[in-house]
Image: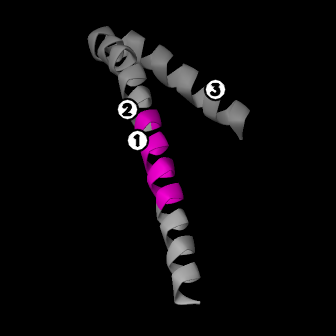
Amino acid sequence: MIVFAVGMSVSGLGLGFYKGWSLTLALLLIGPLIGIGFTSFMVMMTKGMAETIRSYGKSAGYAE
């Protein structure tokens, strides 16, 4: 599946450069920014989830 996805990505970029290079170039420049934003969002969500689980653990201790 990974080989298929990489092949589709490379062929899509190749076709994009052939048909309309300016849009493909813009996508290549914006793509890493989207990846960085998604990674930072996932890190924040993971930290928030860990804090929530810790809070539930404390409240369960108080309830007992």
> Which residue is at a point 70% across and 35% down the rendered structure image?
2
Q: Which of disc 3 and disc 2 is earlier in sequence?
A: 3
Q: Are marks 2 and 3 in contact (CB under 8 Å)?
A: no
Q: Which of disc 3 and disc 1 is earlier in sequence?
A: 3
Residue at numbered disc 1: 41
> Which residue is at a point 30% across and 15% down the rendered structure image?
26
Residue at numbered disc 2: 37
Q: Secondary structure at mark 2?
A: helix
Look at the image and give the residue range highlighted in magenta: 39-51
In the image, taking residue 8 as reference, residue 27 lies left or right, namely left
Q: In this picture, is 2 found above or below 23? A: below
Q: Quadrant of the C terminus?
A: bottom right
Q: Are marks 2 and 1 in contact (CB under 8 Å)?
A: yes
**Dot 3 amino acid type:** Gly
Q: In this picture, is 39 found above or below 29? A: below
Location of residue 55 in the rendering, given as x and y in whole percent from the top left corner: 48, 68
| Residue 41 within the magenta-colored segment of the rendering | yes
Residue at numbered disc 3: 7
**Dot 1 amino acid type:** Phe
Q: Quadrant of the N terminus?
A: top right
Q: CA distance from mark 2 to mark 3?
A: 25 Å
Marks 1, 3: nearer the viewer = 1
> Which residue is at a point 44% across and 29% down the rendered structure image?
35
| Residue 15 within the magenta-colored segment of the rendering | no
**Dot 2 amino acid type:** Gly
